[in-house]
Amino acid sequence: MIKLKNQFKIISIYLFVLLGFFLIFNTKCLHAFPGIDLDARKHQLEEEINTLIIELTNVFNDTNL
């Protein structure tokens, strides 16, 4: 039982140190880098909104129901 407790302490310390190194050296994962600038994304969203509005008006203007 004592051996298992010591192994658990060693493993937990190792994981804590590993997590620390991950947070220190890999900070790019912590920030949002979208890979596309905000103006281009805004343009995409405006196009999607326009497309959805057109589809919505087509559904409500369909008199074949």
Image (cartoon, rainbow, N blue to C red):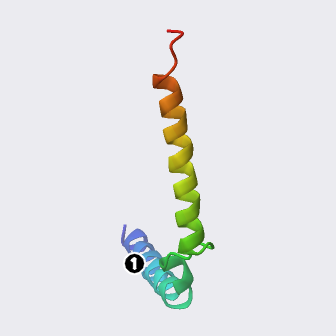
Q: Is residue 18 above or below residue 3?
A: below
Quadrant in which the N terminus appears: bottom left
According to the picture, the residue beneath numbered tag 1 turns out to be 9
State the residue lying farthest toward the right. Answer: 35
Q: Amino acid at mark 1?
A: Lys
Toward the viewer: 54 or 42? Answer: 54
Q: Nearer the viewer, residue 9 or 17?
A: 17
Q: Residue at x 54, y 9 (%)?
A: 64
Q: Quadrant of residue 5?
A: bottom left
Q: In percent of the image, x 52 and y 41: which residue is there? A: 52
For disc 1, the neighbor class at 10 Å (few under 14, some 14 to 19, many from 20) is: few
Residue in front for this viewpoint, 46 or 11: 46
Q: 40 or 13: which is nearer to us?
A: 40
| x and y, in percent, of residue 18 in the image | 51, 82
Residue 63: percent from left, percent from top: 50, 13
Residue at figure coordinates x 53%, y 57% from the top left: 45
Q: Quadrant of residue 12?
A: bottom left
48 over 56 or under it: above or below:
below
- Secondary structure beneath disc 1? helix
Residue placed furthest toward the top: 65
| Position of residue 35 measured from the top left corner of the image (x, y, whole percent) | 63, 73
Residue drawn at x 53%, y 73% is 38
**On screen, residue 36 above or below 55:** below
